C-alpha cells in the first residue's frame, strides 16, 4: 500500500463495515498528516462526512483525533506503531577537587563538587491541532413568482418551512422582479401576458364606456320629458 495516497471510497466503506462488526481497523498516516506520517493508528469511529471533511476518528497513543481520508491509508499486514525513542545522553562524572596544602597562606575551603548535568530528553512530537468542525449552513431559500387566473402572486420558503404564503402583487411589481432575472425568454413571456391582459382590459373599458354613453343618453331623454 502506498502511504502517500489517501483512503478511497471503497476503503472507507470497508472500514465502516469493520467498525459495525466490532473491529478497529489499523491505518497508517500519509504525508498529508504532517510530522506523524508513517505512524500507525486505529480507527475507532466514523462521524458524519457532511458535517466535516475530517470524519475519520483515529486513536494514536493516548490521543483520539479526527482526520480526513486524504491523511490516512490502510495499514499493510504486520505494520506496528513506530515511535522513535530519544537516546539518553551519558551523565558526566562529578569532579571532586583535591585538598590543597599551602604554607603561610590562609586556608581556602574546598570547592563543592559540581552537580551532574542531566540532559533534557527530546520532546515528543506536538499534538496535531484539531480543526474546528464546520457548522452546517442555513437551509436554502426559495422565492416563487407565479401567474394564474389573471393574478400575480409571490411566495417564499426556506427548506421545508413556508416563510410567506402566496400573496397578490401588482403586474408592474411582477415585471420589475422578472427584470432582475437575466434569462432569455422569461421577460418576453411576462410582457406577452401583460399585453394580453392590457388588451382585454381596454376592450372591457370600451364596452363599459359605450354602455355608460347609452345610459347617459337615456337619462337626458328622461330629463327633457319633464
Image (spheres, rainbow, N blue to C red):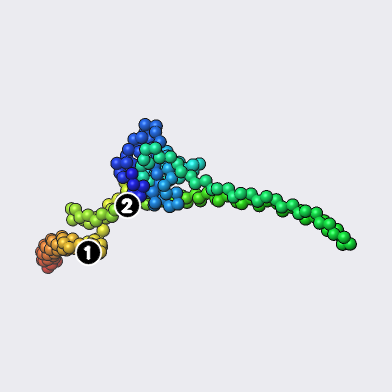
Regarding residue 172, the answer to whether it shows in the image is no
The structure residue drawn at horizontal position 42% and vertical position 43%, both measured from the top left corner, is 40
For numbered disc 2, what is the local secondary structure?
loop
Q: Position of residue 14 (x, y in %)?
A: 32, 38
Q: Is residue 205 above or below residue 125?
A: below
Relative placement, left or right, of 80 versus 192 is right
Disc 1 from disc 2: Cα separation: 21 Å
| Mark closer to the chain start, 1 or 2 | 2
Q: Within the image, what quadrant is residue 28 found in?
A: top left
For this orientation, the residue located farthest to the right is 104
- Residue that badge 1 annotates: 182
In the picture, the disc for residue 140 is 2
Looking at the rendered image, the quarter that the C terminus falls into is bottom left
Q: Nearer the viewer, residue 198 or 86?
A: 86
Q: Within the image, what quadrant is residue 79 found in?
A: top left
* Crowding at mark 2 (Cα within 10 Å: few <14, some 14-19, many 20+): few
Q: Position of residue 29 (x, y in %)?
A: 40, 46
For numbered disc 1, what is the local secondary structure?
loop
The structure residue drawn at horizontal position 35% and vertical position 38%, both measured from the top left corner, is 15
Amino acid at each position: 500500500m502506498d502511504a502517500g495516497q489517501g483512503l478511497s471510497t471503497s476503503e472507507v466503506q470497508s472500514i465502516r463495515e469493520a467498525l459495525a462488526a466490532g473491529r478497529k481497523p489499523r491505518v497508517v498516516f500519509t504525508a498529508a498528516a504532517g510530522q506523524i506520517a508513517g505512524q500507525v493508528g486505529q480507527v475507532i469511529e466514523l462521524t458524519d462526512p457532511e458535517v466535516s471533511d475530517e470524519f475519520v476518528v483515529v486513536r494514536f497513543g493516548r490521543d483520539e483525533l479526527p482526520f480526513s481520508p486524504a491523511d490516512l491509508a490502510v495499514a499493510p499486514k504486520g505494520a506496528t506503531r513506530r515511535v522513535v525513542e530519544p537516546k539518553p545522553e551519558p551523565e558526566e562524572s562529578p569532579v571532586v577537587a583535591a585538598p590543597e596544602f599551602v604554607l603561610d597562606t590562609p586556608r581556602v575551603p574546598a570547592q563543592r563538587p559540581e552537580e551532574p548535568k542531566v540532559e533534557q530528553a527530546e520532546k515528543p512530537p506536538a499534538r496535531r491541532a484539531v480543526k474546528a468542525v464546520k457548522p452546517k449552513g442555513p437551509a436554502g431559500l426559495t422565492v416563487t413568482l407565479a401567474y394564474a387566473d389573471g393574478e400575480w402572486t409571490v411566495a417564499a420558503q426556506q427548506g421545508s418551512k413556508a416563510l410567506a404564503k402566496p400573496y397578490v402583487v401588482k403586474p408592474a411589481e411582477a415585471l420589475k422582479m422578472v427584470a432582475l432575472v437575466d434569462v432569455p425568454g422569461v421577460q418576453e413571456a411576462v410582457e406577452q401576458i401583460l399585453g394580453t391582459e392590457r388588451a382585454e382590459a381596454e376592450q372591457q373599458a370600451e364596452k363599459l364606456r359605450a354602455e355608460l354613453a347609452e345610459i347617459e343618453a337615456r337619462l337626458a331623454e328622461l330629463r327633457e320629458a319633464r
